[in-house]
Amino acid sequence: MGFTRRDLLKTTAGVSAGLMAPALIGSGARAQELSFKPEDGASLRLLRWSPFVKGDEEQWLANTKKFTEATGVEVRVDKESWEDIRPKAAVAANVGSGPDLMLVWFDDPHQYPDKLLDVSDLANYLGNKYGGWYDGPKSYATRDGAFVGLPLATIGNAIVYRESWVKEAGFTEFPKTTDKFLELCQALQKTGHPVGFTHGHGVGDGNNYAHWLLWSHGGKMVDEKGMVTINSPETLKAIEYAMELYKTFIPGTEGWLDVNNNRAFLAGELSVIANGISAYYSAKNDPKLAEIAKDIRTTNLPIGPVGQAAELFQVTSAVIFKYTKYPNAAKAYLQFMFEEAQMSEWITKSSGYCCQTLKAFASNPMWTADPANAPYAKASETLRNNGYAGPLGYASAAVMADYVLVDMFAEAVTGQQTPQAAMERAEKRANRYYRV
């Protein structure tokens, strides 16, 4: 969609209803418009996670530049590794200084909600205008009915595999159940094309895999009342299944972070991984990997004994710290970035990596432009939050930040603990946070 500097200047925040596609905003066009007047001399600093898809960062920076041109507010965008975002956000919240805004993970906002600016006015405006927020992402950014952040994106997770190697292993299509999936992994190992899933402290891949293992077999960290229930027959079955899968893995996955499975897969060392669209994106955009790209397929993770999809996807939310000197400028910036002219282009350039959190953007043609994008298209709609089946809060955030579930599986599959001992240790660790 084309627009001019004059369009951008129609409101103080550089956002105008005239820029919005009528077909997209629909009845939301009747919603009251909202604008924030940046403070005199305002400048902002945003800290975000390092990108895995080049187009994501490039478009984010391009949109930021447009905001500065429209308002005069300079925005410095810094980036850190995925693993470093969580501790840096916690430090900033506790000491009361640092970036004005951050893109944080999962239920991090629930660890320090009193240190975050209430953005309910902006969130409600955007929700009314763009078809509402998906419940999963919304749960991560709301506390006691108030928005303490804006759900920015869900980074989907799916099986990424080499089709020719799967066929070589004797499978004409990718298995849809966990039992058949194990058979495939065993067959792939025998043909010299092992699989690999992250058992290390990967913010995305490690947590996604561990939660899928647990939930697909009916286990859960806590019940509806927040009582720790990880020590259960269902969890034991999940661990035993993980141990069988692990036998088919390439060595070293217990030390992997979020970058490792991408690298090994694109190096031809692996036949199957669970990942965002980034692995396919990298191959598709590298002439040296053209042959691999042609062979890559994606699909949703297999269904376990529970009989339905039960997956965690990493959600990132944009938060503003209360200590910022320029709260209006920060809100204006986020409003600008979420409006259709910017958000649609960012989702498009992210090439299936960043799934929309506002329902109106689900119609982005990017989702059907390439069959590989399809398994990621409904990530925000189908995700289960990491606090399942209990409430989100400090405890759920702390248990994830401490990698309690990831460590339970890693300790069992590597033989550091028996399955029972691994469950009991996870139970003890979780109970430190879920105090009754």
Image (tube, rainbow, N blue to C red):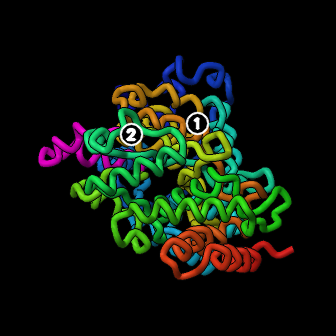
Point 41% across, 38% down: residue: 174
Residue identified by numbered label 2: 298
Mark number, residue 358 = 1
- Queried whether the magenta region covers residue 290, the answer comes back as yes
Point 77% across, 65% down: residue: 229
Q: Report x, y in % for residue 263.
A: 28, 60
Q: Amino acid at mark 1?
A: Leu
Q: CA distance from mark 2 to mark 1?
A: 24 Å
Q: Quadrant of the N terminus?
A: top left
Total number of numbered discs in the rendering: 2
Point out the tag, 2 or 1, that comes first from the N-terminus.
2
Q: Residues within 10 Å of mark 1 (few under 14, many from 20)?
A: many
Q: Is residue 363 left or right of residue 26?
A: left
Q: Quadrant of the C terminus?
A: bottom right
Identify the secondary structure beneath mark 1: loop
- Queried whether the magenta region covers residue 3, the answer comes back as no
> What is the magenta range?
275-297
Q: Report x, y in % for residue 141.
A: 66, 53
Q: Residues within 10 Å of mark 2 (few under 14, many from 20)?
A: many
Identify the secondary structure beneath mark 2: strand
Q: Report x, y in % for residue 168.
A: 27, 42
Q: Is residue 312 visible?
A: yes
